[in-house]
Amino acid sequence: MRRWTAVALALLCAVVSASPVNAKPADVAERLRAVAGLTVDERPSTIAGVRWFWLTYSQPVDHAHPERGSFTQRVMLQHRSLDRPMVFHTTGHFVPETMFQTEPATLLGANQLSMEYRFYPPSRPDPVDWTKDTLRQGAADQHRLIVALRGIYPQKWITTGGSKGGQAAVIHRRYYPDDVAGTVAYVAPNDIDDQEDSAYERFFATVGNDPACRARVKAVAREILERRPAMQQLLASRAAAQGWTFDTVGGIDVAFELSVMDYEVGFWAFNPESACAALPSPDAGDEALFRSFDSVLGFPFFTDQALAPFTQTFYQGGTEMGWWRPSLSHLRPLLRHENAYQPRTFLPRSIPMTYDGTVIRDVDRWVRQHGTRLMFVNGGNDPYTAEPYRLGPGSRDSAVYTAPGVQHVFLGNVIDKLPAWQRAKATADLRRWAS
């Protein structure tokens, strides 16, 4: 008996002496590089106490059939500490190539992961199968990345995003509700009935504090449409100098008119109400009117060059997310191409599109009937949330906030602009979710 005890003790001592008791834990970069399908490139940081990693992650083109090809998805990681929460920022579009802090990451002192949405260049397979550019596939991208990195970042995860990114965060929660501890969705649109858009007309009838401002925005749009020949000449000159073309939408006249149709929503979405004071008077010169219109909204958006990177957005708008149709009564009878205001116009004709609102309606039902730990933060002057997410009898530990006077803010501090008691509650809830 003693002999076997002695042998056992000898073996135990050998194991203990060979074990790296004082070994230094693996650096986070080493742990990241050990994740299958993940490439890691550390870049110089511009935020004190935060390390910056440019990552790419191999994702299936079709999560239901991973054997049918893959693409690499860009991800930006801002690392503070492994004992801090993780804020997963879904952009809905491109991933920013500069360091920034989302509001939840700032409030929590958290790590931050920012993922480029599938099929935005360069996170796009070649050739691309647009039928796999779906909301469910995008949610599966998020889920798969969380599963891959949760072992490295074991603290609570919070998802967030603005606009299309906020919508993506909510859609991910519907299909993978237990992936994260909570979601903060900023200015997230929710177009559950693509044929009914009266909410936007009610919004434009009441937005802001000054009826004169609302009237002036409409008047500027109508005035520029009244001066179609002069405005088009200025646009054509600029396009020639910049090398812009208008083949996708069907010519410069269509592009010009689309810009005018987009002016009211663009003004309120991306400009403070105080910008009304700088709008030109009806008798302003052609060049002054052109410059003002261009600075508020931007004529170049409907060029081939500007539209091409956003194929992903227009495709999902025309197949699943929906697209708003303004009444444009203040522009009639001057319009020639009103029916062009739809996603089909902004895409090459070689890409087929059929609308199916099943996912959007399903997510809306889930929010009302089962949504838990959801925070919707909207802007009072933002037309994109004229059709917002709403809570229902089954929603739990969730809230909807509207920041007065705030426009369509993707990354700004909107919680900070809420009334004091709402700001305190929203901040406390977020911190409670993240423990």
Image (spheres, rainbow, N blue to C red):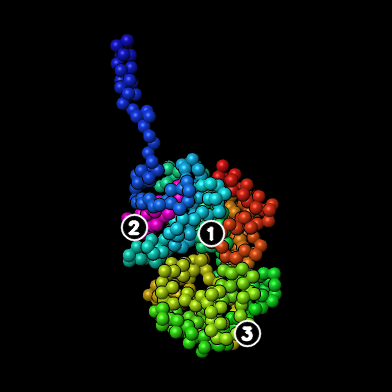
Select label 3 or label 2 by which is in front.
Answer: 3
In the displayed image of the protein, which residue is found farthest to the bottom? 229
Q: Is residue 57 left or right of residue 103?
A: left
Residue in the foreground of this view, choosing between 53 and 10:
53
Q: Is residue 204 magenta?
A: no
Q: Which residue is mark 1?
A: 411
Q: Secondary structure at mark 1?
A: loop
Range of the magenta residues? 53-79
Separation of residues labelled 2 and 1 (CA atoms): 30 Å
Residue in the foreground of this view, choosing between 62 and 103:
103
Q: Which residue is mark 2?
A: 70
The amino acid at mark 2 is Ser
Select label 2 or label 1 by which is in front.
Answer: 1
Residue 247, horizontal then vertical, whole percent? 41, 80
Can residue 196 be seen here? The reply is: no
Image: 39 above or below 230? above
Hey, which quadrant is residue 70 in on the image?
bottom left
Q: Residue at x 53, y 84 (%)?
A: 287
In the displayed image of the protein, which residue is found farthest to the top? 2
The amino acid at mark 3 is Pro
Q: Residue at x 66, y 62 (%)?
A: 404
Hey, which quadrant is residue 121 in on the image?
bottom left
- Location of the N terminus by quadrant is top left
Q: Which residue is mark 3?
A: 282
The amino acid at mark 1 is Leu
Residue 4, horizontal then vertical, whole percent? 30, 14
